[in-house]
Amino acid sequence: MNKVVEIKILDNYIVWLKFEDGFNSQIDLRPFLGKGIAKELLEEDKFKTLDLEEGGGIAWYNGYDFCPNYLRQLTEEK
């Protein structure tokens, strides 16, 4: 299983991720925002509440999250 161990929130909804095995990459999360509970995350102050989850994924205060395996898949595809 993959695990995100560090994040840095950059500009324009881009987040830098570092995985437990040392792999790191940037991902543009903008395409995943704007609908449902993710709509409010288009507000910069709310987007910046992003944090690591205990299970190695990332999540916001409102419960919107990404599992680490999906994040790894997305970052390796780019």
Image (spheres, grey):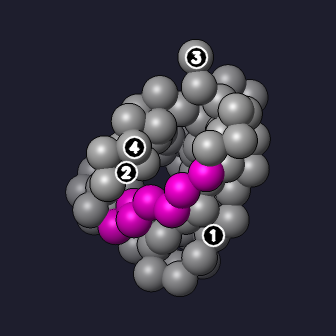
For the residues labelled 4 and 1, the Cα–Cα distance comes to: 19 Å
Residue 50, quarter of the rendered image:
bottom right
Point 61% across, 51% down: residue = 24
Q: Look at the image and say whether residue 26 sits in the magenta stretch.
A: yes
For the residues labelled 3 and 4, the Cα–Cα distance comes to: 15 Å
Q: Which one is closest to the eye, mark 3 or mark 4?
A: 4
Q: Is residue 50 left or right of residue 22?
A: left
Quarter in which the C terminus is drawn: bottom left
Residue that label 3 marks: 1
Identify the mark at residue 40; answer none if there is no mark: none
Find numbered disc 3 in the image and state the secondary structure of the residue it sits on: loop
For the residues labelled 2 and 1, the Cα–Cα distance comes to: 20 Å
Residue that label 1 marks: 9
For the residues labelled 1 and 3, the Cα–Cα distance comes to: 23 Å
Report the magenta residues as a range: 24-30
Residue that label 4 marks: 76
Sequence-first tag of 3 and 4: 3
Q: Is residue 59 left or right of residue 29?
A: right
Find numbered disc 1 in the image and state the secondary structure of the residue it sits on: strand
